[in-house]
Amino acid sequence: MEKATNTGPGAETLANDRGSETRTPPPPPTLTAVGDVESHHSEQAAARNDDDFPEGGRQAWTVLFGTWCVLFCTYGLGNSIGVFQTYYVNEALRQYSSSTISWILSFMQWLLNFMPIVWGFAFDKYGPRWILLCGTITYVVGMMLLSLCTEYYQFFLAQSIVCPIGASAATSASMSCLVTWFQRRRGLAFGIMMSGSSFGGIVLPIMIPKMIERVGFAWAIRTVGFTFLALLTIACCTVRSRLTPEKRPVDVREYLRGVREPTMMSTVFGLFLVFWGLFLPYNFVILQAKAQGMDSELVIYLLPIMHAVGIIGRVVPGLVADRIGRYNTMIIIATTTGIACLALWIPIKNDAGILVFTAAFGFLSSGLTSIGPTLIAQISDIREIGARTGTAFAFQSFGALTGSPIASAIVDARGGEYLGLQLFCGFSIFASAGVFASARYVQAGGFKLKKV
């Protein structure tokens, strides 16, 4: 069997077919500056002796299918929150303001992204099995509790606390597992995985309103819960890590070490800005369309359209990222998404314009969520992937938490006009491109045309 020869900490290792060959990493060089430390850390992650990634094979693709099922259930429902926002505003909680109602869905998004900071360390220490199983049970129980809700505090407890605790456990464990199977093709793998959330975003926004009309809210949510139970059971049987967990004591420094690195700090701040504006079109495009007089039969297809094109928008950027670099791709996507919000969303005043924007935003923004986790994996030691991914998710979760309430308050303050919300969304995502560019600058050692 042919072996690869390491010439330095940045040398790229070749994955063999069986993924069992070990290599001795070279001794660390003398580091004299923060930039050197940062460059060494990100390069060293690619040269670990544990990093003989299979890049495919039956087991790897089976794990990918299991993670796809998880993302359909977790982020798929998260991508459908516009349906809940509309139902709560017009029916179940119509006595409350839109801003007050948005806290239910924003807190759900926040906890879904914050809790991986806990599950990530548990994954590194114990592996995925029990995290995924407990997450499945908790999430399904939360959906059943949601079906019984009639009061604001009940909706908040079920949908904003119980559901995201379970969903975050399942999502964190499955994502961390997938990282251990792919490196060179990681962008493609994550794009396929995240397409599960797009499929969920197609099916659920059509399924839930139709079922509410026919059988009521309670049985609509129970049906969704049983569907999730079936898919998550598949995930429990298929998702597993390639690495053996290392049982070690809790060390808070594992979390702090990452945020002290310039590239890590810039990356997580960029993800925060992305999540500050990312969910606003998903949450408010239905309400805006109704306010502009769009037919109700057409309105319910806005989110499915957004997520249908998002399937392509998740896979294609992954392929591009594997070729030209993940940071390069992220900068391009963030820039074009911000421009789309400012140049397309603001001027539209008719049904055709709304449809064009939803399709454009669905395609462009989908790459942000699929490429984001691969940035953290690129600059991390695979043995700490759970903790470092959890740290990044925790930071970006505060963007998801505050974005919608801020946007709702802006709309209320402007008497129902959406211009302020659209500006907030566009500039937040556009600004993230500059932050990602600064992270790329540190990694590349300047503004060099290279794969980063």
Image (cartoon, grey):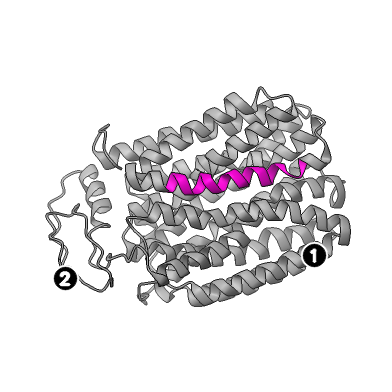
Q: Which residue is mark 1?
A: 147
Mark 1 or mark 2: whose residue is earlier in sequence: 2
Q: Is residue 292 above or below residue 151?
A: above
Q: Is residue 14 above or below residue 132?
A: above
**The image quarter in which residue 27 lies:** bottom left
- Left or right, 359 with respect to 285, comes to left
Q: Is residue 197 above or below residue 177?
A: above
Q: CA distance from mark 1 to mark 2?
A: 58 Å
Residue 233 or 188: which is nearer the viewer?
A: 188
Name the disc covering residue 1, or none: 2
At which x and y percent is residue 171? 54, 63
Q: Look at the magenta stretch and give its main secondary structure.
A: helix
Q: Residue at x 82, y 31 (%)?
A: 293
Q: Residue at x 52, y 73 (%)?
A: 131
At which x and y percent is residue 53? 31, 65
**The image quarter in which residue 406 lies:** top right
Give the position of the C terminus as an image quadrant: top left
At which x and y percent is residue 245? 37, 75
Q: Residue at x 55, y 67 (%)?
A: 170
User: How dense is the environment of label 1, judged by Cα within 10 Å: few (below 14), some, or many (20 and up)?
Assistant: many
In this rendering, the count of numbered labels is: 2
The stretch in magenta equals: 299-318
* Residue 111 visible in rendering: no
Callout 2: helix, strand or loop?
loop
